Image (cartoon, rainbow, N blue to C red):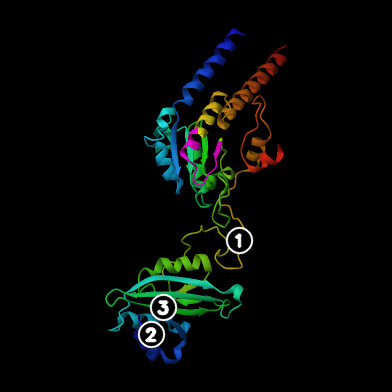
């Protein structure tokens, strides 16, 4: 589909391209982390490429596969004028999870990068507003990392214990136990 | 004695009136809301049970219908809505997500709204059929008639405690005067 675009990127970056692959039209280039900004600008502004839309920006955690570097940030580019797509990836090591922002190249990257920060803990250098976007500020950790325990809960609202105890104590005169909570099932 | 019997009957009459005029606050967050719509529609017609009036202000509602998945981030909002409803109030948990978290077991979903607010009737199902909801509504009406809703019991308890306090105070004052 966009083999020409991939070839031009390889030709342009030369040693900056770490690997490429293409399977049924998903031309992908893994490039050097430090080159991401210049590469994105070039891909957007060069005639014949014109990737004027960032359709997605996301990340992958290869923790369970033991790959090095652990993370990968993925950029899905789309050209509305030339109707072609290209995928660009950068590897991000665990010790230094920082990538340059592309917010000023495609504005949509602002929220996408916040999402990646929120769920994977990868920071974006020079991002204007690097806050969590989905989880609450009190949340500890980054839940889409593969080493985040899948059933760990971090309640934002905790019902006071005395309220639960009172409700379960059996009220005088009511003749019935308040019917709520799994604890009620266990006790009866 | 006679007075007690009369007030008892009055309370029953009030409960009877309440159970047939439930104003619902639909806290609809997910796909169960589709079933809620069919429940409200002419085919299942919840109006037959007197609960046809959705109020989108908690101040005007007595029945909180939690329809759909509640996330941890929404839990304080739900609690706040519940607190804003005037007593007596009733809570119906509509569908498995609201009741237990359903098939979600992860960092983001509340495993049942009973972690946050007391629930009177649970409706299983993903989503529940409208008949199930009507059944739950009838169960809730029974509960109201029995003065057995959670907030009803709390009101009763508060009344008793106030009476006891009054009696104690009264008793102690007579003791000192004697």
Q: Which chain hosts label 2?
A: A
Rounded to the nearest angstrom, the CA distance separating label 2 from label 3 is: 10 Å
Mark 1 lies on a secondary structure that is loop
Segment colored magenta: B121-134
Say whether residue A48 is left or right of residue B150: left
Residue for badge 1: A150
- Disc number lying in front (2 or 1): 2
Task: Provide residue B33's location: percent of width, then percent of height.
Answer: 43, 44
Say whether residue B72 is left or right of residue A149: left
Rounded to the nearest angstrom, the CA distance separating label 2 from label 1 is: 38 Å
- Disc number lying in front (3 or 1): 3
The residue positioned 62% from the left and 27% from the top of the image is: B157
Q: Which of marks 2 and 1 is nearer the N terminus?
A: 2
- Quarter the N terminus of chain B occupies: top right
Q: Which chain hosts label 3?
A: A
Instruction: Give the mark count.
Output: 3
Mark 2 lies on a secondary structure that is helix
Residue A169 seen anywhere in this rendered image of the structure = yes
Residue for badge 2: A6
Task: Provide residue A74's location: percent of width, then percent of height.
Answer: 45, 75
- Quarter the C terminus of chain B occupies: top right
**Residue A120, magenta (yes or no):** no
């Amino acid at each position: 589909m966009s083999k020409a675009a991939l070839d031009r990127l390889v030709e342009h970056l030369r040693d900056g391209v770490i690997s490429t692959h293409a399977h049924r039209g998903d031309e992908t280039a893994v490039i050097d982390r430090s080159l991401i900004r210049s590469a994105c600008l070039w891909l957007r502004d060069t005639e014949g490429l014109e990737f004027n839309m960032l359709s997605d920006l996301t990340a992958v955690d290869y923790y369970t596969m033991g790959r090095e570097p652990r993370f990968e940030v993925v950029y899905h580019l789309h050209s509305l004028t030339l109707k072609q797509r290209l995928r660009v990836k950068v590897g991000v090591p665990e010790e230094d999870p920082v990538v340059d922002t592309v917010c000023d190249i495609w504005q949509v990257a602002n929220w996408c990068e916040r999402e990646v920060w929120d769920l994977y803990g990868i920071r974006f250098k020079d991002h204007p507003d690097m806050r969590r976007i989905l989880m609450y500020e009190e949340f500890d950790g980054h839940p889409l990392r593969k080493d985040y325990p899948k059933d760990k809960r971090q309640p934002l609202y905790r019902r006071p214990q005395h309220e639960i105890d009172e409700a379960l104590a059996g009220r005088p005169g009511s003749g019935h136990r308040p019917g709520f909570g799994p604890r009620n099932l266990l006790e009866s | 004695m006679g007075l007690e019997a009369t007030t008892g009957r009055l309370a029953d009459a009030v409960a009877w009136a309440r159970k047939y005029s439930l104003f619902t606050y639909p806290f609809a967050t997910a796909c169960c809301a589709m079933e809620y719509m069919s429940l409200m529609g002419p085919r299942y017609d919840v109006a037959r049970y007197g609960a046809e009036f959705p109020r989108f202000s908690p101040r005007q509602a007595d029945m909180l219908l939690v329809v759909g998945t509640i996330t941890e981030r929404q839990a304080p909002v739900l609690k706040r809505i519940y607190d804003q409803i005037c007593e007596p109030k009733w809570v119906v948990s509509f569908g498995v997500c609201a009741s237990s978290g359903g098939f979600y077991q992860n960092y983001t979903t509340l495993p049942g709204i009973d972690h946050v607010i007391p629930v009177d009737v649970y409706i299983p199902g993903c989503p529940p059929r409208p008949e199930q909801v009507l059944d739950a509504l009838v169960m809730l009406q029974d509960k109201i008639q029995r003065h057995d809703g959670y907030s009803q019991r709390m009101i009763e308890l508060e009344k008793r405690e106030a009476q006891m306090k009054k009696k104690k105070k009264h008793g102690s004052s007579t003791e000192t005067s004697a």
